Image: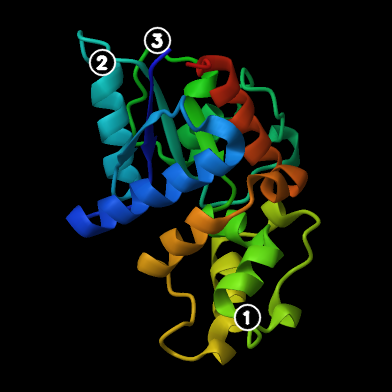
Amino acid sequence: MNVRLYVEGGGDKLGDNRCREGFRKLLEHAGYAGRMPRIVAGGGRNQAFDMFRNAQLSPIQDGYCILLIDSEDVLLSRNTDESPNSPHAWNHVREREQAWSIPLPVENDQCQLMVSCMETWILADRETLAAVFGTNLNQSALPALEDLERRDHEFVQQALENATRPCGIDKMYKGGKRSYTVLAALNADRLRTCLPHFRRFIATLDSHLTNQ
């Protein structure tokens, strides 16, 4: 099955290219070379949702549409079911983004969350962080790998900035180009180990992407 993956990220031509490349490389590392989804950089979360919604409502369906966005907030413990068919992701979006008009019908697995943000994925792979940022990386400023998805967006961003500050102003983590460079180098197996929602995302792709 063809899959279109609408991701939060990018925002201009150069940013879109970096975003698509970062996610493409990560998915290749996860074993999807030769059966990749079409990755669409949606820009901000509102824009990504609008692109997903328009594609979902289009009378000409060109593949299975999946939305991948930051949760922004920590999810309640009762909402951490890893099953692709769990409704918790859409429920979280409905509670947080009440202005969004979610298209119907829609499947539960069409909403995937990076909890609480893409940088949580980056925090999950300490070996890649060390390889990218070098020996000056302050690993003591990084939170424990256990329960990373219980850390809110602001905490995760600040932890990455604090840990990479000794690497110099030109190399310190500040999102944008640097974020997609790190994303492209991540080891998907390390993310699977400690991130339940990454496992849910991979299980969803496995159910829709076939070997070619």
Is there CB contact under 8 Å for labels 1 and 2? no
Residue 30 x %, y %: 60, 38
Colour scheme employed for the rendering of this structure: rainbow
Q: Residue at x 33, y 55 (%)?
A: 18
Q: Residue at x 53, y 31 (%)?
A: 32
Q: Is residue 176 visible?
A: no
Please name which of the two marks, 1 or 2, marks the residue nearer to the observer.
Answer: 1
- Given the image, on which type of amino acid does mark 3 rest? Pro
Between the residue at mark 1 and the residue at mark 2, the CA separation in whole angstroms equals: 43 Å
Q: Residues within 10 Å of mark 2 (few under 14, many from 20)?
A: few
Q: Residue at x 44, y 63 (%)?
A: 181
**Quarter of the rendering containing residue 207:** top right
Q: Residue at x 46, y 24 (%)?
A: 35
Mark toward the start of the polypeptide (2 vs 3): 2
Residue where numbered disc 3 is placed: 105
Q: For the residue labelled by badge 1, is the local secondary structure a helix, a strand or a loop? A: helix
Task: Assign the N terminus to one quadrant of the image.
Answer: top left
Residue where numbered disc 2 is placed: 57
Mark toward the start of the polypeptide (3 vs 1): 3
Q: Which mark is residue 163?
A: 1
Along the horizontal axis of the image, is 1 left or right of 190? left
Residue 145 x %, y %: 77, 60
- Given the image, on which type of amino acid does mark 1 rest? Ala
